[in-house]
Image (spheres, helix red, strand yellow):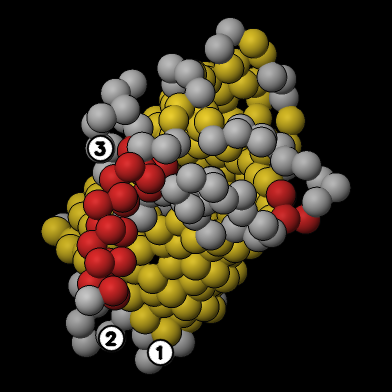
Amino acid sequence: MKRFLTFLLSIVLWPLSMMAWDWSETPTSLTSHSMQLRVGAEFTKKWQNGLALHFGEDLRFDMFDITNGANVGASFNKSYTNLSLSYKNPRFKYIKVDVGYTLKIMGNKDWSNVNKWMRHRAHIGISGSYRYEQWSFSLRERLQTEIRMGSIDQHIATGYYEHNRADLYLRSKVEVAYHAMSKPLKPYIWCEVVNTLNANPLQQKYANNDPTQQGHQYIRRVRSSLGVVWRLTQRSSLDFYYRFNYGYDRDVTLKANSQKLLLTEETSYQHVIGIAYNFGW
């Protein structure tokens, strides 16, 4: 009986404990407009059984970044070191599966603390493709997780943490490409949508400036790209592209020595010009 009463009391008091935390003020908003230069290279080793090993490096530099009217200036943004393994059945070439790992280095974080500027990312994905004459169509679904290092601040009243230890996303990408017959060129266009799958409960609680509205999961990125692959030799090519990235995120900050929370809604509009070298054997 005592255990039952304790359980019943905890159920009754749980909603009150959820009301113990409060937002420090109306959520602030940050809007940024930026242009980025990206330079990358990828090397692929293929085997006859359908396996392929991919290794790549991607460097990103901000040419300018205007956040709420203030120009942050040019700087090194990020680097991605990628290693992945893919498989495509030689008898059924329409489907490909892949797994991979990425070491992510953040150039705009505190370099005195490795936990601030290093991230680990892993993914598993499946792609379907179909070719009709000179046109090819593909759809890719990728489950991705990004892992934070170091300690994560906890909110005393709710027990929630300021950030997830591992963020989980679903990335959906559709692409159309044209394979020119008379010239070594392949123009393409694609669009990708990135959805959160485990948004922090504090991020979900407050949405659209309404503390009573449940935000749940949300679209974090929408990316589109227009480019052309120029085949140099049978084994190498250059990829020239332009991308536009729309981003939306919710950043929760725990106020020191307080039960107050501060939510910042971040919206970004980014233009990207990039070039990548690809070599396979």
Residue for badge 3? 214
Q: Residue at x 44, y 67 (%)?
A: 123
**Residue 163, relative to residue 85: is it above or below?**
above
Residue 114: % across, % down? 77, 55
- Identify the mark nearer the N-term, 2 or 1: 1
Q: Nearer the viewer, residue 125 or 96?
A: 125
Residue 171: % across, % down? 33, 53
Amino acid type, callout 1: Gln
Circle on res. 153? none
Circle on res. 48? 1
Amino acid type, callout 3: Gln
Residue for badge 2? 90
From where the camera sits, is residue 65 visible?
yes
Q: Classify the position of the N terminus by image quarter.
A: bottom left
- Identify the mark nearer the N-term, 3 or 2: 2
From where the camera sits, is residue 203 visible?
no
Please report contact status of discs 1 and 3: CB closer than 8 Å, yes or no. Answer: no
Asked where in the image residue 259 lies, by quadrant, the reply is: top right
Q: Classify the position of the C terminus by image quarter.
A: bottom right
Q: Residue at x 54, y 69 (%)?
A: 101
Report helix, strand or loop for mark 1.
Answer: loop
Q: Residue at x 49, y 60 (%)?
A: 166
